[in-house]
Amino acid sequence: MFEIFGKADNAEGVWVKHPSNQKVELRVRQMPLPVAREIEGRYGKEEPNPLGSGIPITRRTTAEIDQLRIDKGVWCWTDTRNFEVKLRDQEAVDFFSKWLLDSTLKLNDVVKVDGKLNDQIKRFFFEKFSSLILFVLSEADKAELKSAEKEAELSKT
């Protein structure tokens, strides 16, 4: 069966439970190859292959690799359920006031991010919690693998 028209059921991702808090769920989608290539093309410098093959290599700094992961994670992470943040410092209050458009936020407030996730909020979390980016990218890879397995099964019929 070929799904040509309309959205696939998991077009916006699959729901996965966060490993350290099973109440929190993140919606993660697989990254199509053209999107991955576009993001990867933003970082690094292509150089001739020192082994002489015609395939160039891309060299990236550690900072570029970190930013590449964040950009991929931002694309893959689409939503949350039961994701709450306690605002423990003024930086967090200012940030969430700006990006959630809520000027009433104050220290020690608990903010629910469900349905309000945007690129800036995702970047904020990824920059603060490196394990979160690794989790999101790992789940995106798993979703891609499951999709490939499903496609292989369908091609057998």
Image (cartoon, rainbow, N blue to C red):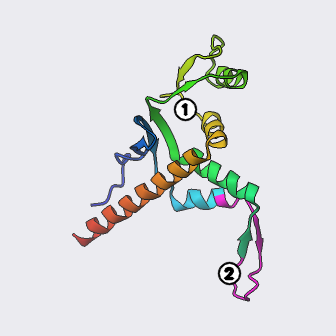
SS state under label 2? loop
Depth order, front residue of 147/156: 147
Give x and y (percent) for residue 37.
61, 62
Q: Where is residue 65 in the image (x, y as percent from the top left)?
A: 69, 58
Residue displayed at 65% across by 16% down: 107
| Left or right: where 105 falls relative to 62 | left
**Circle 1: is it few (<14), some (14-19), or many (20+) Cα within 10 Å?**
some
Instruction: Name which residue lies at 28% across and 69% down.
Output: 155
Q: Is mark 1 on a helix, strand or loop?
A: loop
State the quadrant of the N terminus.
bottom left
| Along the viewing direction, whichever of 35 and 50 lies nearer the viewer | 50
Q: In which quarter of the image is residue 53?
A: bottom right
> Left or right: 129 with respect to 9?
right
Q: Specify the segment rendered in magenta.
A: 40-56
Q: What residue type is labelled 1?
A: Leu
Asked if residue 123 is positioned above or below residue 89 in the image, the reply reads below
Residue lying at the far top in this picture: please name it. 104
Determine whether 99 is above or below 108 in the image: below
Q: Say which amino acid is labelled 2.
A: Ile
Q: How far apart are marks 1 and 2 (CA)?
A: 39 Å
Most prominent secondary structure in the magenta stretch? loop
Which label is found at residue 55? 2
Q: Residue at x 38, y 64 (%)?
A: 148
The relative height of residue 111 versus residue 34 in the rendered view (above or below) is above
The residue that appears at 40% across and 44% down in the rendered structure is: 16
Q: Is residue 117 left or right of residue 16?
A: right
Residue beneath label 1, please? Answer: 117
- In reply to whether residue 50 is colored magenta, the answer given is yes
Dot label at residue 86: none
Check if residue 32 falls in the magenta segment.
no
